[in-house]
Amino acid sequence: MTVWRAFKRDRLALLGAIIVAIVVVVAILAPWLAPAPDDATIAVHPVDGLLAPGSGHWFGTDQVGRDILTRVLFGARTSLRIAIEVLVIAALVGMPLGILAGYAGGIVGDVIMRITDVFLAFPALLLSLALAAVLTPSVSNAAIAISVTWWPWYTRLIRAQAATVAASGYVTAARALGVSHVRILIRHVVPNAAAPVIVQASLDFGGVILTAAALSYLGLGAQDPTPEWGLMVNQGQTLFQTHWWVVTFPGLAILVTALGFNLIGDGLRTIIDPRQVLHDRGS
Amino acid sequence: MIRLLARRLAQALVVVAGVVVVTFAVARVIPGDPAVTYAGPRAQKAELEAVRQKLGLDRAWPAQLATYAGGIVTGDWGTSLHTRRPVLDDLATAVPASLELVAVALLGAAALGIPLGVLAARRKGRLVDITIRLLTTLSVSMPVFWLGLILQHQLSWFPVSGEYAADLDYTSPLTVYTHMTIVDAAIGGNGPVLTSALAHVVLPAMAIAAYPLGAIAQMTRASLLEVIGEDHVRMARALGFSERTIYARLAMRPALNPVIALIALVFAYSLANTFLVESIYDWPGLGSYAAAAIGSLDTPAILGVTLLIAIVYVLLNLVVDVVQTLIDPRLRGSA
């Protein structure tokens, strides 16, 4: 496992791994870790509104008296859920198209790649925002809207891979022996394409989480009372001058989570392919 | 060369045509019944019919698409539902302010990011490098809307809203040439407005600059490290040229090529990021316009902004492609 050894030597990547591990554990254990689990759903306590951080509420409370620490902890679930949904949909749509474009080539491949170019012409935030704006705002629709902007990256990634495999000697040999296209795809092309997709998906977590938070901040993603960090920043922004904690903690949660994933991604990228530098992708 | 240009231009036009189709799909196909969106939930049947006829929704969708695409080409981008003005006019008013903001942000990001990247590359693996990598990763991980709020709160000795102090309109009225306040004030020699505008742009530009700063520094570092590993640089080292000469004379120029391409592409991303920052600072650009449009479910306006930024993105890509091919003859074969 030379990759693992190189990864361990990269202290920043290790830091990223620790952060991500904490976020994942928090997401799983949120109901047990949170001081007031009901505040993540329907509970409101207007009497306790806007309490400053202190012994009762480490991160303070929001306008309707909900414990912000609780909502930040549960927010990890929302963010990870969106990110996983987006990346699974993007991979499930992008991979078959990329395999088809690479393996079949010709006109089919050209058409698929031109469509890919069109979707890549929109900055991720932009197209997902336009889509989310015409859909009913919800966590699932935000995930769908982001997926629509994300799949082309996988198609592009996989096409080259599939084309190389299709042109390789053992595939030609298998064809000559009468092995069907379907069998070649399943036995040779898909397994070869899977690894880069998984790596790319792990690099993309940070970007997806930032995009999702931005959609929710604009009111186009999660809706109250769903605990979502971007939405929490939105709800607290008019109070910032007087009640800093309502905005500060959820924003820090976004920053730290994205940082963790991006540090891992950076480390992986340097180990796997030092020449491939960051995606030109906004947040 | 001419053939190459023509081919790239044709490819870009195909992509722009595709972009128009996608925005059409978002506007007309996905929302179910756009007539209901347009007329409001309480509209009567007859009203809905009237709206359908007005929007052309009673026709087959290829005909609708043709009308829509024809409108885009001839400058009819629809009417904004919240300003009740043609979308293209609204965009023309909003674009200069955003261009100004993004340009200042990218200038700052490049001025700081490139030296940071060079420094990190020269001290690869040392503490300086690790610190810069951590800071730049932090910078690309920033939720920009949150950064905007934090900066506004923490650095409030800078002006926190608008393009320049409004009371200057009485004492030193600004002559408008380009609708970009800083440029106009500089051209007109309007000192007070220039000073005020420069102070006003600092905070929103810092929020917009976070992502480009980190991305530029990381790209500079990676690109420089790659060039340093190439044979001709190793040869120069073996011949005993000083590190200074190697970096300044041999490595920097090829290493900056991808960085310049990145800056052009990040430009479009930053235009999209103005959606998250401008409304915080009452900056009268595309972002504030888009945020208001989202708030009032103004689909024509949202799609107008989307289309505009996508077209800018495609054109910038084209320019970068062509310029790089002109600079680097090695790329010509692959065209």
Image (cartoon, coloured by chain):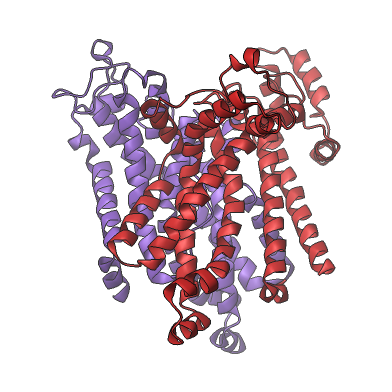
Residue closest to the eye, B164 or A10: B164
Tell me the quadrant of the picture where the N terminus of chain A can be found. Answer: bottom left
Q: Quadrant of residue A73?
A: top left
Residue closest to the eye, A163 or B100: B100
> Compared to B182, does B223 lie above or below?
below
Q: Which chain is red?
A: B
Residue at x 68%, y 18% (from the top left corner): B173
Q: Quadrant of residue B21?
A: top right
Residue at x 36%, y 35% (from the top left corner): A251
The reply to whether residue B302 is visible in this rendering is no
The hue of chain A in the figure is purple
> Compared to B50, does A119 lie above or below?
below
Residue at x 21%, y 26% (from the top left corner): A36
Tell me residue B117's x, y (percent).
44, 59
> Compared to B125, does B299 lie above or below?
above
Tell me residue B89's x, y (percent).
76, 27
> Compared to B136, does A274 lie above or below?
below
